[in-house]
Image (cartoon, helix red, strand yellow):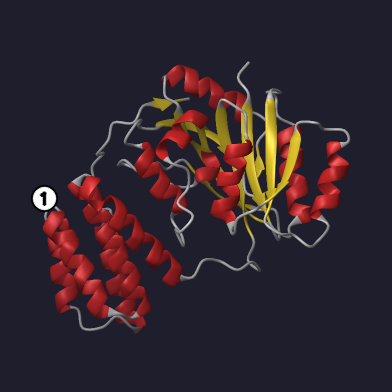
């Protein structure tokens, strides 16, 4: 039986981390280890984990010698001994069948990189907000908490870029794609929490993350995939009110789009008179709809149940 390593960075979320741990313990597949990397918690996280370890030897606990979640994930990967890795944030939970069903998907597909469906719930109410079965139509893949991937493949690709301000999982996925495309596993395997009181990534961080992604990988992307990312960055800048930067990226997207959809969007942007108020919201909606309009499947990802 293959050993599965679950990598979980944490910081001052003792109560939520207890639920994440419980979701590992309740797995139907029993050959696993959970690597918890504490990024400097001061809420008694270490005492709680030490108590759990008395009855559950598969839980391993380390203090992060680096800085930030990306460094914590990398440290956890290097401390892991499993053949396959899964990632779980401290406010997320596995569904009981996750390890078993994803490992079956690995064997069915022949791929060492699996992307599964997931649920999102409101941590304040416990209500499930949505189920997401979506997968990328190109090379990259986001939402690392729903991956199962061989440890060897992640190490070969070079681990997480610790300098990424955001988009670190997407950036890593493009390096992984140099060696293997993911297979889509058409099953929900985990629940991701949304905490409305937590600090979320700012728009500025997301823009910087996407810009760094394109600096590193635009030349290796399929032209239409690069065009899509440039278009998204243009929409980001438009949402901040920076029309000049938005225009630059809409133009980059238009130049790479053989369908000419983004050329139409760029023309629409150039003649629209407002990005504020009701008219501005209508204009933004039109541009958003054009972003994914008739967007084709660029990479033939295997699909398994």
Q: Is residue 1 visible?
A: yes
At label 1, counting other C-alpha atoms closer than 10 Å, the crowd grade (few under 14, some 14-19, many 20 or more) is: few
- Left or right: where 186 falls relative to 8: left
Give the vertical position of 256 relative to 157 (above or below).
below
Q: Position of residue 99 (x, y in %)?
A: 61, 28
Q: Is residue 285 visible?
A: no
Callout 1: SS: loop
Which residue corresponds to mark 1? 258
Give the vertical position of 293 relative to 270 (above or below).
above
Viewer-closest of 79 and 113 = 79
Q: Position of residue 116 (x, y in %)?
A: 49, 35
Viewer-closest of 192 and 82 = 82
Viewer-closest of 104 and 280 = 104
Query: Residue drawn 28% across and 68% down?
Result: 234
Q: Residue furthest top?
A: 1
Quadrant of the image occupied by residue 54: top right
Query: Residue drawn 28% across and 53% down?
Result: 292
Q: Position of residue 19 (x, y in %)?
A: 75, 46
Give the vertical position of 272 relative to 136 (above or below).
below
Q: Residue furthest front?
A: 65
Query: Residue drawn 49% across and 32% down?
Result: 149
Q: Position of residue 52 (x, y in %)?
A: 85, 40
Query: Residue drawn 63% across and 37% down?
Result: 79
């Amino acid at each position: 039986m293959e050993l599965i390593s679950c990598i979980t960075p944490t910081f001052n979320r003792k109560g939520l981390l207890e639920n994440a741990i419980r979701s590992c313990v309740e797995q139907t597949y029993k050959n696993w280890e959970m690597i918890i990397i504490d990024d400097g918690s001061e809420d008694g996280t270490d005492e709680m984990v030490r108590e759990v370890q008395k009855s559950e030897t598969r839980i391993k606990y380390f203090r992060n010698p680096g800085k930030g979640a990306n460094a914590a994930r990398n440290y956890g990967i290097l401390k892991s001994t499993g053949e396959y890795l899964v990632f779980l944030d401290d406010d997320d939970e596995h569904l009981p069948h996750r390890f078993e069903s994803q490992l079956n998907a690995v064997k069915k597909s022949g791929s060492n990189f699996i992307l599964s469906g997931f649920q999102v719930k409101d941590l304040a109410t416990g209500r499930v907000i949505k189920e997401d079965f979506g997968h990328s139509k190109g090379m990259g893949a986001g939402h690392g908490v729903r991956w199962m991937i061989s440890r060897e493949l992640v190490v070969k690709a070079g681990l997480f870029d610790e300098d990424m301000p955001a988009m670190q999982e997407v950036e890593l996925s493009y390096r992984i794609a140099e060696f293997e495309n993911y297979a889509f596993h058409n099953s929900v395997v985990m629940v991701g929490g949304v905490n409305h009181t937590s600090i979320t990534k700012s728009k500025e961080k997301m823009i910087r993350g996407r810009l760094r992604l394109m600096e590193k990988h635009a030349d290796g992307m399929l032209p239409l995939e690069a065009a899509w990312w440039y278009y998204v960055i243009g929409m980001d800048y438009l949402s901040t009110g920076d029309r000049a930067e938005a225009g630059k990226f809409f133009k980059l997207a238009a130049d790479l789009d053989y369908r000419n959809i983004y050329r139409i969007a760029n023309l629409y942007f150039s003649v629209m008179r407002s990005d504020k108020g009701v008219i501005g919201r209508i204009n933004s909606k039109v541009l958003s709809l054009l972003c994914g309009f008739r967007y084709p499947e660029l990479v033939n990802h295997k699909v398994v149940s």
